[in-house]
Amino acid sequence: MKTKKPIVAISGCLVGEAIRYDGQHKRHPHVVHELSKVFEYFSFCPEVAMGLGIPRPTIRLMDKGGVTHLVDTKDSSIDHTKLAKKTFKTHTKGIEKASGIVLTRNSPSCGYDPVKVYNEKTGIPATKERGLWAAHLEKEFPLTPIIDSGRLYDDHLRETFRTQVLAHQEFSELPKEPKALVKFHEVYKYYLYQYGAVHVKKLGGICAGVTKTNFSQKYKDYGEYLFGTAFKKTITTKNRTNVAEHLAGYFKSNLEGGDKKYLHDNIKAFYNNKLSFESLIVLIGFLVKTYKQGYLKDQKIFSFYGKY
């Protein structure tokens, strides 16, 4: 049975909805052309939900006595903060089903990467922090992968988000039985190694000894560590090179000298930024199929980064 697409909650303007302050959209090319093949979108707009209208006066974040407020750009006495917080409490309906969240860059409400906060007295930017809606979503859904739309232009960050969303969906749909958690950890092993061996060891320790009696707690602990700690770390070239070396080790008795050198030359090329990680994984995946490497064939790192 084909797995359904994961749901991704997203700022509506990014999918082409004409709901911005100027009545326009902010259609994102990677959102509408590439990621739409993988995700099912659930769109929202907190400013429209607040009843600010389309079009509407622009708003911005302002520091008032050490507290961040959402105010009218031209007249800061028009304060939308209370309305925003009241709206946020009901506007999250539906987002709890999402395995990922994409938010509009530089928005005082949706900006996930820090946006400008203006000083009340001087009227000039003083600090930066997340938009009010973005901060609310992060608090409400701390284990859901979130990304700022500006970061989707970076191939590596976009792919990391895509794979984390797929992992989130699969984990949330796991059968509530011990063997399912153990199997999840097993097939995600080399994908997880990208974040560091210490996290694989920690997660392995969590699911070790899982039983029907302690499953609920083990599942909770595993999810909190995976999405709240491991996935918050940066995937590094060094870690990915270590992953490739580990995978290459499975073929040391299969490959002749020239083929073995070719494989390690490609790993070195990746390390030196002369070959993409996806291309390297496709190569190793070909070896998995060719030599019928049973343990590796189900590893998520291959289905996530390259078909074989």
Image (spheres, grey):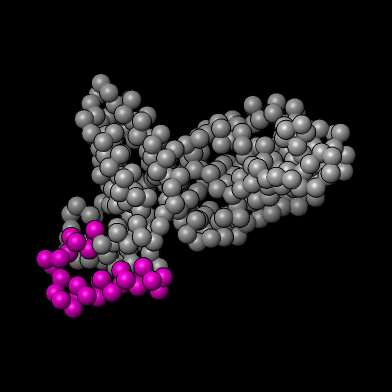
Camera sees residue 245: yes
Residue at image point 28% right, 74% down:
265
Residue at image point 85% right, 34% down:
78
Q: Nearer the viewer, residue 43 or 256?
A: 256
Q: Nearer the viewer, residue 49 or 281?
A: 281
Picture quadrant where residue 137 is located: top right
Camera sees residue 45: no
In the image, which residues are magenta?
A: 246-274
Q: Nearer the viewer, residue 205 or 94?
A: 205
Residue at image point 75% right, 27% down:
82
Tell me residue 177's x, y (percent): 27, 29
Quadrant containing the N terminus in the rendered view: top left
Task: State left or right for residue 80 relative to residue 192.
Answer: right
In the orientation shown, which residue stands out farthest toward the top?
Answer: 213
In the orientation shown, which residue stands out farthest toward the left?
Answer: 253
- Magenta stretch containing residue 254, yes or no? yes
